[in-house]
Image (cartoon, helix red, strand yellow):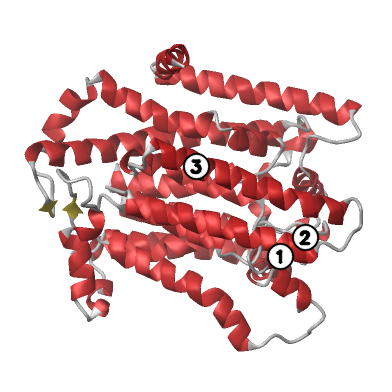
C-alpha cells in the first residue's frame, strides 16, 4: 500500500503540462479504439447521440433544418460546429470534445489556484471577514513556489482529467464537455479576471447551449453583491463556513430583497448575459422558428422518460403516462423541493466570495438528483465542478470510501431490474423504482456530508 501511495504521489507531482498531454493521449487512444470497436463489434462504442449530431450537421450542410433529424434536442450551433464530421473525418467531433476536456482541466487549475491562494492568504493573516484582500497580490508568487501547494492543485485536475466517466463520455461522442467548459469559463472570468461583462456573455452562451446553467444565475448575481464578503472559518474543525459572518448576515436580515439591488458589476453581468443569450436565441429562432425553441428548451422542461432512469420520479411518470392532463399541484410538488434548495444555497453561499464554487456544486447536485429525468451522463456536470471544491471538503477517508462504495452498489443494484426489463421483457418497474429511491438516498447523504465537512 505504501508503495502504491508513493507512486501515486510521484505521478501526481508531474508537471501540469505532462498531465495535459497524457490526458489528451489517453482520449485519442480511446477514440481510435472506439472506431475499431464500431467496425468490428455488434455493440458499438460510439454514443447514439453522436450519430444524431452528425445527421443534424448533414441537414445543415444541405441547407435544411437540423431539427429535421428526429431526437436532435440541441441548439443549431452544435450541429454547425460538427459539420467537419462530414467534410474532414467522422471522428472530428470526438476529438473536439476531447479538446474541451483538456480546456476544462486548464480552467480547473486556474480557478483552484486563485481560490486556494485567497483562502491561504486569509488563514495566514488570520482574516475572518473582509470586503477586499489588501496586499493579496504581493503574496501570490511566494505561495506558488510551495511544491505542496502545486501538488494540491494537480490532485484537483487529476480528478477530472483521468476520471473514467469523463474520458468515456467525450470519446463516445457526447458533448457535455462543452457546457462544462462554458460554466467554468464563466467562473474563471468572474473570479480570476473580474471581467463581469465577458462573464455574462459566457453565462449566456452556456445557457444557450444547455438550459441547466440557468440555475446558477442567482448565485453568480449575489457573488457580486455589495453585501458579499471574503469569509472563512478555521482553527476549529467543527466550525464550518455555515457559521461565518456573511452566512449569518444572510439569515438575520429578513428583507432579502435588499440583496437583489444591483450594483455596477451586476449590471455589467446582466447586460453581457442578455446580450449574448438574446442574440443567439434570436438568430436561431429566425432561422428555425418554433422547432428550435421546442426541441432545444421546451422539450427538456417537459421531458419524461417512462422506460427507466435513475430519477426518484420515474415510477410516478410511468404510472401517469396515459393521463393527458397532470395537476398543477403535482408538477409543483415535484419542482418545489429543488427550487427551495437552489434558492437557499444561493443566499447561503453566494454571499461569500470564497464559496461561489461550492454553491455551484451544491446546486448542480440538487438539480441532477431532484430532476425528473436522471441518466449517468448528468453526473459529468457534477464532476466538472467537484475539483473546484474538493480541497475544502474535509470528509474523513472512511466516510469517503463508504459513500463511494454505497453509490456504486446502488447503481449496480439498479442495473439488475433494468436489465430484466430491457432485455428479458419482465415487468420490473416497481423494483427499478425501489432502487431509484435507494440511489436518491445515497446522493442526499453525499450532499449532506459535503455541507457538513465543508470548511
Looking at the image, is mark 3 or mark 2 nearer the viewer?
3
- Residue in the image at 89% along x and 50% along y: 423
Residue 151: percent from left, percent from top: 34, 23
The answer to which image quadrant residue 284 occupies is bottom right
Q: Secondary structure at mark 3?
A: helix
Closer to the camera in the image, 412 or 104:
412
- Tell me which residue sits at (53%, 42%) in the image: 404
Give the spatial CA distance, label 3 vs label 2: 45 Å
User: How many other residues sit within 10 Å of disc 2, few (<14), some (14-19) or many (≥20)?
Assistant: many
Choose between 327 and 23: the one closer to the eye: 327
**Residue, disc 1:** 295
Which residue corresponds to mark 3?
Answer: 402
**Which residue in the structure is indicated by mark 2?**
67
Mark 1 or mark 2: whose residue is earlier in sequence:
2
Q: Could you classify mark 1 by the number of other residues whose Cα lies within 10 Å: few (under 14), some (14-19), or many (20 or more)?
A: some
Please tell me whether residue 106 is drawn above or below residue 453 in the rendered image.
above
Residue 87 in the image: above or below residue 263? above
Q: Relative to residue 108, is residue 52 drawn left or right?
A: right
Secondary element under disc 2, as helix, strand or loop, is helix
Amino acid at each position: 500500500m505504501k508503495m502504491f501511495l508513493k507512486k501515486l504521489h510521484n505521478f501526481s507531482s508531474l508537471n501540469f503540462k505532462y498531465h495535459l498531454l497524457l490526458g489528451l493521449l489517453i482520449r485519442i487512444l480511446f477514440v481510435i479504439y472506439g472506431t475499431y470497436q464500431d467496425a468490428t463489434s455488434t455493440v458499438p462504442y460510439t454514443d447514439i447521440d453522436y450519430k444524431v449530431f452528425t445527421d443534424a450537421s448533414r441537414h445543415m450542410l444541405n441547407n435544411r433544418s437540423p431539427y429535421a433529424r428526429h431526437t436532435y434536442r440541441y441548439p443549431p450551433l452544435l450541429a454547425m460546429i460538427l459539420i467537419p464530421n462530414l467534410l474532414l473525418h467522422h471522428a472530428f467531433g470526438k476529438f473536439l470534445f476531447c479538446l474541451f476536456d483538456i480546456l476544462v482541466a486548464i480552467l480547473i487549475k486556474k480557478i483552484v489556484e486563485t481560490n486556494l491562494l485567497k483562502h491561504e492568504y486569509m488563514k495566514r493573516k488570520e482574516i475572518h471577514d473582509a470586503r477586499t484582500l489588501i496586499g493579496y497580490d504581493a503574496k501570490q508568487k511566494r505561495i506558488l513556489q510551495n511544491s505542496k501547494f502545486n501538488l494540491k492543485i494537480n490532485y484537483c485536475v487529476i480528478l477530472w482529467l483521468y476520471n473514467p466517466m469523463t474520458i468515456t463520455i467525450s470519446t463516445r461522442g457526447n458533448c457535455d464537455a462543452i457546457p462544462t467548459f462554458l460554466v467554468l469559463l464563466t467562473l474563471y472570468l468572474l473570479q480570476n479576471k473580474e471581467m463581469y461583462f465577458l462573464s455574462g456573455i459566457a453565462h449566456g452562451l452556456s445557457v444557450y447551449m444547455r438550459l441547466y446553467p440557468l440555475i446558477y444565475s442567482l448565485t453568480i448575481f449575489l457573488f457580486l453583491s455589495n453585501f458579499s464578503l471574503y469569509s472563512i472559518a478555521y482553527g476549529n474543525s467543527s466550525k464550518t463556513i455555515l457559521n461565518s459572518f456573511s452566512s449569518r448576515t444572510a439569515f438575520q436580515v429578513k428583507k432579502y430583497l435588499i440583496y437583489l439591488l444591483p450594483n455596477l458589476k451586476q449590471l455589467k453581468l446582466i447586460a453581457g448575459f442578455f446580450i449574448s443569450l438574446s442574440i443567439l436565441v434570436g438568430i436561431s429562432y429566425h432561422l428555425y422558428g418554433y422547432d428550435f425553441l421546442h426541441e432545444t428548451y421546451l422539450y427538456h422542461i417537459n421531458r419524461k422518460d417512462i422506460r427507466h432512469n435513475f430519477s426518484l420520479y420515474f415510477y410516478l411518470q410511468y404510472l401517469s403516462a396515459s393521463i393527458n392532463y397532470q395537476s398543477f399541484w403535482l408538477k409543483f410538488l415535484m419542482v418545489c423541493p429543488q427550487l427551495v434548495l437552489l434558492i437557499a444555497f444561493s443566499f447561503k453561499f453566494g454571499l461569500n466570495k470564497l464559496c461561489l464554487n461550492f454553491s455551484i456544486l451544491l446546486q448542480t447536485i440538487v438539480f441532477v438528483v431532484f430532476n425528473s429525468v436522471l441518466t449517468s451522463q448528468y453526473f459529468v456536470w457534477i464532476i466538472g465542478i467537484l475539483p473546484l471544491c474538493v480541497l475544502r471538503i474535509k470528509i474523513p477517508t472512511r466516510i469517503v470510501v463508504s459513500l463511494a462504495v454505497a453509490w456504486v452498489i446502488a447503481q449496480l443494484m439498479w442495473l439488475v431490474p433494468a436489465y430484466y426489463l430491457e432485455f428479458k421483457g419482465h415487468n420490473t418497474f416497481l423494483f427499478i423504482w425501489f432502487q431509484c429511491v435507494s440511489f436518491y438516498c445515497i446522493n442526499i447523504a453525499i450532499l449532506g456530508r459535503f455541507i457538513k465537512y465543508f470548511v
